[in-house]
């Protein structure tokens, strides 16, 4: 065999052989257990960065393992091709977005293939293709006809740079999620998905996602923000109108001294406003959320008053910069004595402060700050003397009996605005007719495609400037009509794409029978930054499609893995502006794809950030060459014993039996660790096994050496597939490594072997102990408690819980 591995020739050769053999084709084999591996598909930016490489190496390793284990593996890839990234890049390059997207797609696909990723490209999808556009527009019409999509004129988040509307989830720290520009409010017509209909199910369903990171679930819980309280109707004095207020503190209703409205409140659109109010409102609407938060809390009186329904008192209505439309009703009942924010505002504006709960504060005395603790009601009519927690329910009952309020649940989650005033997106399939109103485009007219005669570099909706696109006929009455001028938010495209992969060319959006078999996704890999965007929307889509009778499951993803970022050597995020970007192509060219993959998987745990080291790929290459040198050293044994099997009968010496034991320990560990996404420890086990091989006398037991080495190559094939294939071929192996079954762990070989696990108390290291590989949780915990030092630490303490991590850890949590 060759004395040295040459990655330049080997990688291209084996990638062609895999393709020719159809090695990664999804078989759709109904006789095998299914397994669906998926990474969040990328924007067609034209550039595959090192973070992509880390993400995809993880999914590829798991997919290769599951194929070897006999699963019917579906591992597809596609392109999130619509949206601002492609459109803005095309504008900069002077290209049409369609041309830029096609070029970017081919560039990124070539980079993925150079990494040796085992995608089934027969399942490839592109969200800008006519097939995908048609499928998504059909879903839009389905949602529209079932009342899950509606249009409303409302204040929305507007990015002045991107010239488009943003959903609440796309406003990050007051800035646009894409460009960072501060977001302001604009009053425009918008299409919305009624995601709040599913707020309770989205929230409660998180408890059943037991294999999702707690961090993601907590982010979603906070974003949905369910609050139980009371909705109260305040009649506007002298008008045939009411203001609806939501509060979690109905017990303080007798202390309400004014109402405060958000500047966006629709009540302010219904009449001519005093100049002072109009100017204040317009000034606030031009500010971003962070700017409003930092401003001194100010407001102006509207000149209108409301009637408190509990006592008939007339209170002023103000507009205030600290009230937001994104929670509750956009109107608050202000109780300065029992809310610090209202207290500060009232002091600044000379408004009354009336105490109605007594506890630590002296009733009737002046307050230096709001009293926000529990207590009993004072000056609260028939409710005086009640504990405030009981009074809230009693007051709510009284309001309900009078028709002035009711118990209510409110959510921070807002309905999802999906209209985008940009060109490069899926057109909204709605026609506006003066006679018939909004009508869906008829199915035989789909897909509704983007026109080419559009100047998409101006402001506002580019489609509105194309007469040939906008002018049409009403599908209901046949009269003149206008198409909708907006395109869909790109997050609509990614909210269901995982359903399209099993049948990427189906006339329907997806084939239900196939999707019900292959979904939900078994392992989904992507960044935590999508916790309140893509992941929330995908969960909503699946639940809505289930209720439309199109699916049989409730959640899209069984297991979710959030990979850590790849930073530069100093821990900074990689950025072209900082000049610290690592190019995967350059690393592959110098060290090979397997060295890059091995380095990205081995350096740290999958969910932790990886700080790039220029020596890391070289170190990984050194290990692979070490395996290669071992094969060269053992070449005679490998060629002479091509059919050797590593079983008890083939081992004649104690050293051979020990090698067999270590071999099966390694198979067991690599299998479990990859299944648990612990790639770094799996690779460490392979490195340890290699050390054991170097100490073994192959000349004394050549058949054992040959059989064991081929098992190592099979294990190596899921993390360094090109090297493994070349080793397999050059040492006489038949067929492809990727076609070989995964080695089975022979329990008999493990008898007498032990493994070390760590014992902790309250997360602090105490000792390591040896246990049998097949010892379960009960045996491991009993063994740990049997150590004297552990017993001393637990004596006299309350054991709150015991944490057991198979093969790794027992941790006793005590108080």
Image (spheres, helix red, strand yellow):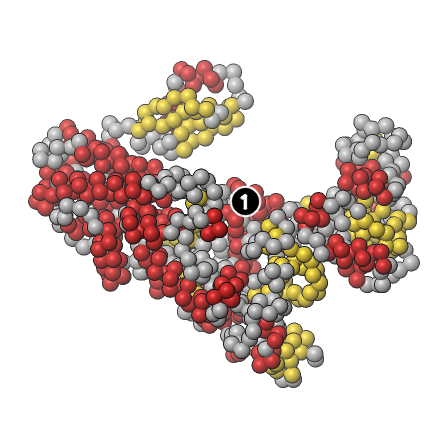
**Residue 459 picture quarter:** bottom right
Question: Residue 453: x percent and y percent?
Answer: 53, 78
Q: Circle 1: is it few (<14), some (14-19), or many (20+) Cα within 10 Å?
A: many
Quadrant of the rendering where the C terminus is positioned:
top right
- In the image, 416 versus 101, the foreground residue is 101
The answer to whether one can see residue 699 in this image is yes
Question: Residue 310: x percent and y percent?
Answer: 87, 46
In this picture, residue 365 sits left or right of residue 435: right
**Residue 195 picture quarter:** bottom right
| Residue at the (25%, 40%) spot, across then down | 623
Query: What element does badge 1 sit on?
Result: helix
| Residue at the (68%, 52%) spot, across then down | 288
Question: Residue 779: x percent and y percent?
Answer: 37, 27
Q: Is residue 353 above or below residue 60?
A: above
| Residue at the (77%, 40%) spot, across then down | 341
Q: How many marks?
A: 1
| Residue at the (91%, 47%) spot, across then down | 313
Q: Is residue 99 above or below residue 607?
A: below
In this picture, residue 428 sits left or right of residue 637: right
In this picture, residue 137 sits left or right of residue 410: left
Q: Is residue 794 above or below residue 210?
A: above
Question: Residue 792: x percent and y percent?
Answer: 45, 15
The answer to whether one can see residue 402 in this image is no
Q: Is residue 573 above or below residue 149?
A: above
In this picture, residue 484 sits left or right of residue 11: right
What residue would you read off at disc 1? 217
């Amino acid at each position: 065999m060759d004395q040295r591995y040459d990655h330049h020739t080997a990688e291209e050769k084996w990638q062609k052989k895999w393709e020719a053999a159809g090695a990664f084709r999804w078989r759709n084999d109904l006789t095998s257990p299914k397994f669906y591996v998926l990474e969040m598909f990328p924007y067609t930016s034209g550039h595959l960065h090192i973070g992509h490489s880390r993400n995809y190496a993880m999914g590829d390793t798991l997919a290769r393992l599951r194929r070897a284990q006999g699963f019917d593996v579906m591992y597809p890839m596609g392109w999130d091709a619509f949206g601002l990234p492609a459109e803005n890049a095309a504008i900069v390059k002077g290209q049409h977005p369609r041309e830029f997207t096609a070029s970017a797609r081919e560039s990124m696909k070539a980079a993925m293939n150079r990494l040796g990723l085992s995608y089934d490209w027969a399942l490839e999808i592109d969200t800008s293709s006519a097939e995908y556009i048609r499928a998504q527009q059909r879903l839009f019409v389905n949602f529209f006809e079932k009342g899950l999509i509606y249009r409303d004129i409302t204040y929305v988040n507007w990015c002045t740079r991107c010239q488009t509307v943003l959903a609440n989830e796309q406003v990050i720290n007051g800035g646009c999620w894409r460009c960072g520009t501060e977001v302001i409010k604009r009053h425009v017509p918008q299409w919305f998905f009624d995601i709040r209909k599913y707020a309770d199910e989205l929230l409660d369903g998180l408890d059943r996602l037991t294999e999702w990171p707690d961090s993601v679930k907590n982010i979603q819980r906070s974003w949905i923000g369910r609050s139980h309280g009371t909705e109260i109707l305040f009649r506007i004095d002298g008008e045939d109108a009411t203001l609806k207020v939501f509060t979690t503190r109905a017990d303080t209703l007798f202390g309400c001294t004014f109402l405060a409205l958000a500047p966006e409140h629709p009540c302010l659109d219904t009449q001519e406003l005093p100049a002072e109010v109009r100017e204040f409102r317009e000034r606030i609407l031009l500010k971003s959320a962070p700017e409003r938060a930092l401003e001194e809390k100010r407001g102006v009186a509207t000149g209108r008053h409301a009637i408190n329904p509990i006592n008939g008192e007339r209170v002023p209505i103000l507009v205030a910069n600290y009230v937001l439309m994104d929670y509750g009703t956009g109107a608050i009942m202000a109780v300065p004595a029992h809310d610090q924010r209202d207290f500060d505002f009232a002091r600044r504006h000379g408004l009354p402060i009336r105490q109605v709960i007594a506890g630590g504060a002296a009733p009737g005395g002046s307050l230096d700050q709001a009293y926000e603790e529990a207590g009993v009601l004072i000056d609260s009519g028939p409710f005086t003397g009640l504990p405030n927690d009981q009074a809230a329910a009693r007051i709510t009952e009284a309001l309900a009996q009078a028709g002035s309020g009711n118990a209510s649940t409110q959510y921070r989650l807002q309905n999802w605005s999906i209209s985008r005033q940009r060109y490069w997106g899926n057109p909204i399939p709605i026609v506006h007719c003066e006679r018939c109103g909004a009508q869906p485009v008829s199915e035989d007219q789909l897909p509704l495609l983007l026109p080419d005669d559009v100047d998409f570099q101006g402001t506002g909706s580019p489609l509105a400037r194309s007469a040939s696109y906008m002018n049409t006929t009403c599908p209901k009455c046949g009269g003149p009509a206008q198409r909708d001028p907006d395109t869909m938010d790109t997050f609509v495209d990614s909210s269901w794409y995982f359903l399209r992969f099993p049948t990427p060319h189906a006339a329907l959006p997806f084939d239900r029978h196939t999707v019900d078999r292959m979904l939900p996704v078994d392992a989904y890999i992507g960044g935590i930054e999508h916790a309140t965007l893509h992941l929330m929307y995908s969960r909503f889509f699946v639940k809505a499609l289930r209720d439309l009778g199109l699916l049989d499951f409730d959640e899209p993803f069984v297991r979710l893995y959030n990979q850590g970022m790849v930073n530069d050597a100093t821990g900074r995020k990689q950025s072209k502006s900082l000049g610290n970007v690592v190019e995967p192509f350059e690393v592959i060219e110098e060290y090979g794809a397997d060295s890059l993959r091995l380095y990205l998987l081995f350096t740290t745990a999958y969910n932790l950030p990886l700080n790039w080291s220029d020596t890391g790929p070289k170190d990984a290459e050194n290990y692979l060459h070490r395996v290669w040198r071992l094969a060269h050293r053992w070449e005679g044994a490998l060629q002479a014993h091509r059919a050797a099997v590593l079983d008890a009968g083939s081992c004649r010496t104690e050293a051979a039996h020990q090698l067999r034991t270590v071999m099966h320990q390694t198979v067991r560990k690599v299998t479990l660790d990859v299944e648990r996404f612990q790639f770094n420890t799996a690779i460490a086990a392979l490195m340890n096994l290699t050390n054991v091989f170097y100490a073994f006398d192959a000349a004394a037991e050549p058949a054992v050496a040959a059989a064991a080495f081929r098992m190592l190559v099979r294990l190596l094939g899921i993390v360094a597939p090109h090297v493994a294939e070349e080793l397999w071929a050059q040492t006489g192996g038949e067929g492809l490594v990727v076609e070989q079954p995964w080695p089975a762990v022979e329990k008999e070989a493990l008898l007498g072997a032990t493994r070390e696990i760590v014992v902790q108390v309250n997360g602090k290291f105490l000792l390591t102990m040896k246990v049998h590989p097949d010892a379960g949780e009960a045996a491991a915990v009993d063994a740990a408690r049997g150590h004297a030092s552990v017993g001393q630490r637990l004596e006299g303490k309350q054991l709150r819980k015991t944490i057991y991590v198979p093969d790794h850890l027992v941790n006793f949590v005590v108080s």
